[in-house]
Amino acid sequence: MNAAGSRNLTELPAWQRLAGHYRAQQFDLATLFAQDPQRAATLSARCGDVLLDYSKNLLDTETLRLLIGLARERNLGDAVSRLFAGEHVNVSENRAALHTALRATSPVMLGGHDVTVDVGRELDRMRTFVTAVRGESVVADVIHIGIGGSYLGPAFAGEALPAYAEKPIRVHYLSTVDGGALQQLFARLNPRTTLVIVASKTFTTTETMANAQAVQRWLAGQLGSEHAAFTRFAAVTARPQLAVAFGIAREQVFEVWDWVGGRYSLCSAMALPLALQIGMDPFDALRAGARAADDHFRTAELDQNIPVILALLDVWYANFHRAASRVVLPYLSGFARFPAYLQQLEMESLGKRATNAGTVVGVDTGLVVWGESGTNGQHAFHQLLHQGTRLVPAEFIVACRAVHAYPEHHDMLLANALAQAEALMTGNTASEPHRACPGNRPSTTLVLPEADAFHLGMLVALYEHKVYAASVIWDINAFDQWGVELGKQLAARIQPELAPQARPGTHDASTAALIHHIKSHSGRRS
Ligand code: F6P
């Protein structure tokens, strides 16, 4: 935390100026475009060949100037330097958040040690493993056991980058603890051609460990011995000793470190299933794209800096326009899981009410993030975007070039994305209320040249940095997640009470009644 970080946000001069500016303006997009013929060019930014068009947002150049002023009063530039330098920006856990070191090409020192040496070693080990597995015909299926940050990144990217799969290795993600998922997998998979990855930074997450044990028992039963089962296991963790104690050979354990947050770990060995699917070279391209975004975030002027602009848009909508959510609309079917990936990245990072100084924030923080790949949403929830009563800023993600052989389909997809953004902004002049679309609804469009591995990596890192920039403005910790702990403790208490013969524990009346109802209808007898 810095000096400005310790000050109440709403007392900052820049905040007061923004509040006055918000009250004084109408922010009518038709008028703003009419007044400024250069608006589309002025309110756009580039990171390499990625374009951000934010001209369809409810702001003008004065708003931007004031928002940048707020970022300066929060010493965002210094905060960015502290992130890259490995300072303990994760204040509550007293740790660095050095996901940028996962793709750095020059030394990154932490406690006198160059962590890129460790990163390089694990990447080399990963390359050897991936090359061996992809080179042999024995492995047809991979079960990846992990949840949250140990699952969402590779699952999203694995669906988004199918065009790179030279050798078909099917990856099955086992995240939640629903036994139905296990049962389906066991019925489908051949144990002799299945590899299992247990991915858990802590190697203690209950769902992951329960699934790992169940898969281990299944494999041991099918292959005839515990030893044979464990030869099929690999692990990714920050606690290799726990993976070894579980029974996995040390050579098959890949390391991450406590200075990488789970939801920021896509460029680490957490992407092992992805690398098995797409190969190591595309994974390197993904890391190179992320590195290009790091350079952009570190060096671009604040008003040209895509993560900074995206963060300021969230602050503008959350705190001044009082929007509660933002919809993310990738017009790329492979990006169907991107909203889920972003939900963890943004909501676990920015869903905070305590400042780094230990006070209550006093303004709304992280927006609810939701979305769906286009054009599916158009036939589901876009109705609310066009005619509903709530303000929901929209974020479109499109790619100029298709990675498939159906260019007309790609044109249709792009036409729909552009049409939705235009319709949200312009609305119509229908006289009948049920046909009228008021327009003036904001959107941002991110344009990738192509949704390849490089640009996917760049996109992910742009959002990682956007989250950090927003956390600096709100003076909250983007790298902890204490709010999830209470539910874990209560689940551990409730689980034994669900056994047929168990006595009920002490709960609120609603929870007690639910436990009683579920037990009496479970079909299990004591
Ligand atoms: O419960 C939340 C969380 O801690 C996430 O932050 C994390 O990504 C996920 O659980 C999985 O944790 P682990 O990788 O330690 O199993």
Image (cartoon, helix red, strand yellow):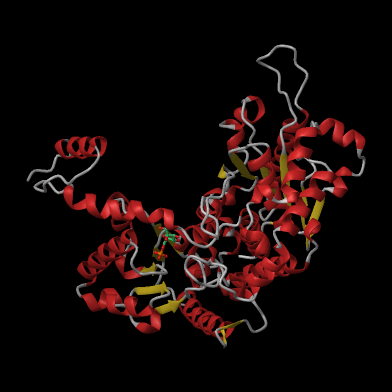
Q: Is residue 409 left or right of residue 203?
A: right
Task: Please tell me which residue is depicted at 71% across the width and 33% down the height of the picture.
Answer: 441
Q: Nearer the viewer, residue 226 or 289?
A: 289
Q: Nearer the viewer, residue 428 or 59?
A: 59
Quarter of the N terminus within the rendering: bottom right
Q: Nearer the viewer, residue 72 or 430?
A: 72
| Residue 233 higher or lower than 523, as above or below | below
Where in the figure is residue 31, as x and y percent of width and height?
86, 31
Where in the figure is residue 416, as x and y percent of width and height?
70, 37
Asked whether the viewer can see residue 232, the reply is: yes
Q: Nearer the viewer, residue 128 or 166?
A: 128
**Residue 449 is drawn in which quadrant?**
bottom right
Ligand 1 shown in quarter: bottom left
Kindly give the residue lying farthest to the top in the view shown: 432
**Residue 145 is drawn in which quadrant?**
bottom left
Kindly give the residue lying farthest to the bottom in the view shown: 112
| Residue 52 higher or lower than 408, as above or below | below
Task: Please tell me which residue is depicted at 14% across the width and 49% down the height of the picture.
Answer: 499
Asked whether the viewer can see residue 400, the reply is: no
Q: Is residue 504 left or right of residue 5?
A: left
**Residue 26 is drawn in which quadrant?**
top right
Task: Please tell me which residue is depicted at 58% across the width and 51% down the height of the picture.
Answer: 334
Where in the figure is residue 290, as x and y percent of width and height?
65, 67
Where in the figure is residue 284, as x and y percent of width and height?
62, 73
Kindly give the residue lying farthest to the left in the view shown: 526
Q: Is residue 50 left or right of residue 517?
A: right
